[in-house]
Amino acid sequence: MKNLLKSEFRKLIYAKSFLGYLSGAIFISLISSIPAAFSINAIKSQLNGTGLMDPALVAEVYGKAITGYLFAMILGIAIMGNEYQNGQAISTFLAVPRRLNVLYAKLVIAAGAGIFLMVTSTLLGFFGAYLGLSHYPHARTSPTVFINLMIAAVVSGAVIAIMGVAIGALVRNVKIAQTGAVLWLVVVERLIVLFWATGGKFLPSGLILGMMDININLKSTKKFLDISSSNYFGPGISITLLLIYAAILATVGTRVSLRRDIE
Amino acid sequence: MSIIEFKGLTKAYKDIVAVKDLTANIEAGRITGFLGPNGAGKSTALKCLLSLAAPTSGSALIRGTKYSELTNPMREVGAVIESGGFNQSVSGIKNLKIIAAAAGISDSRALEVLDLVDLTDARNKKVKEYSLGMKQRLSLASALLGKPEILVLDEPANGLDPIGIAWLREFLKKLARDGHSILISSHQLAEMQNTVDDVLIVHKGRLIAQGTMQKIVGTGTLEEAFIRLVEAS
């Protein structure tokens, strides 16, 4: 297993695409977190008027730092899918024909890379949020925000990347798998929350929010400005559910991959 | 002594039977040509031999064992598969180091095999910048990483220019002199006549002839013998 981990790690760092995914995660975290304080302050009159005096809303601003999880998913899909797409699966399985070991090594490397990607982008996003909030001296920050955010970054980095590997095993075409995953996380999950608010807590994005333990329930005069996470699961249940999702997907992906002929 | 055995190997994809009831033995210390037109089932049979595809029935064994059950597969069998197996955006040497790491082979061996196939100067070039001949040589280098006794080569001469083919011929003869057993698939019959000792001929997934080159060819050419055998099948 040590040899396989070394080989998979080399694939990750030699390909350089990892740096692209890391840059993407950092970029999306920064553009989400820096303006968040200004946005919330701008609409405070349409919320409850307290604005950034409310620690939960400040936590919401810091919570934007975790948006890079999208790239943890894309990374996981690439780690598995590229193997088949560029034919590297042939040399890998010739070197190590016991495919289950190869898949385990991929899951471990994906989890490690996902954690690194998420911790880095979340830390920078947190700093971005801090910069935005520094314009509002009255903003009150809960002391647990940073710890909750980093726990969410570590868990979501590992779990979402593992889900990505499983999707990469199930869908042969990397571009289709990555586009589908992005559409799901960015469009479909948001539409589901818009039309079925209580269902949001079961979705990966809702579980990541749940891990951060942000408890907001603000109703606006305009429905799309509502900010509500009060019905979301707490960190324990969120982590457990996310792990269950990853375990189910990884099991299905592994089974399909073991049966597949290498073309 | 047989080092490779196909025992009633059949591989079907839905309604298409790519290999049908293939039974053959490959002897040690010889170069064996696995010949047939494109689509005859050669690559499919080799993928079954290398555990890249699962047989529908029958088996393909190396020294009596499935490839997937060999303890150190790359140290026993070196393989070149037609479709390659390299990340095109990564250099030749890095691709070899990735494979070497997986098989527990030292990085210094990657440099040695690149030297064996005359690619030392191009080691840091990305594979997508390699010519077809260079890619074939890189595949041979990866097959030699584990210093295996047995080589399984699927269409290694595909797309090579005359100089590349001549280089490959001499390279294979040198490997055979060094004691390697080689199973090489090809549809280039004229070239194979100058290279191989024994011949397996497949057509539409079936084995239609097996024997020494001299026995199969007789007094004519391999091409003439092949056409005669295909028409008779």
Image (cartoon, grey):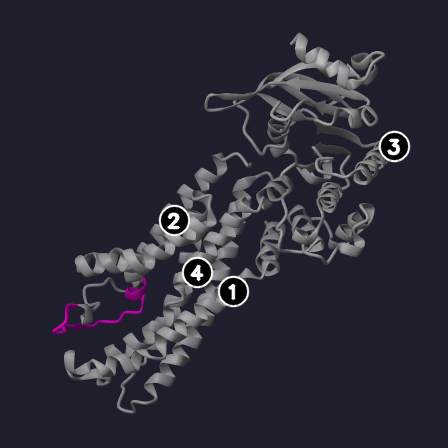
Give the distance between the C-alpha atoms of the residues marked 3 and 2, in whole angstroms: 52 Å
Residue B116 has which mark? none
Q: Earlier in the sequence, mark 4 or mark 2?
A: 4
Disc 1 element:
helix
> Which amino acid, by three-letter code, is at mark 3?
Arg
Tags 1 and 3 in contact by the CB under 8 Å rule? no
Q: Given the image, what chain letter belongs to the residue carrying mark 1?
A: A
Give x and y (percent) for residue A200: 23, 59
Dot 3, crowdedness within 10 Å: few (<14), some or many (≥20)?
few
Q: Is residue A118 left or right of residue B23?
A: left
Q: Given the image, what chain letter belongs to the residue carrying mark 3?
A: B
- Region rendered in magenta: A208-223
Give x and y (percent) for residue B169: 82, 34
- The residue under label 3 is B177
Give the distance between the C-alpha atoms of the residues marked 3 and 4, in whole angstroms: 51 Å
Asked whether the viewer can see residue B189, the reply is yes
Q: In the rendered image, which quarter contains the C terminus of chain B?
A: top right
Q: Are marks 3 and 4 on the same chain?
A: no
Give the distance between the C-alpha atoms of the residues marked 4 and 2, in whole angstroms: 16 Å
Q: Given the image, what chain letter belongs to the residue carrying mark 4?
A: A
Tags 3 and 4 in contact by the CB under 8 Å rule? no
Q: Earlier in the sequence, mark 1 or mark 4?
A: 1
Which residue is rendered at x = 74% and y = 35% of the image?
A: B157
Can you tell which of label 4 and label 2 is closer to the viewer? 4
Q: Are marks 1 and 4 on the same chain?
A: yes
> Which amino acid, by three-letter code, is at mark 1?
Gly
- The residue under label 4 is A72
- The residue under label 2 is A247
Q: Are marks 1 and 2 on the same chain?
A: yes
Asked whether the viewer can see residue A116, the reply is no
Q: Given the image, what chain letter belongs to the residue carrying mark 2?
A: A
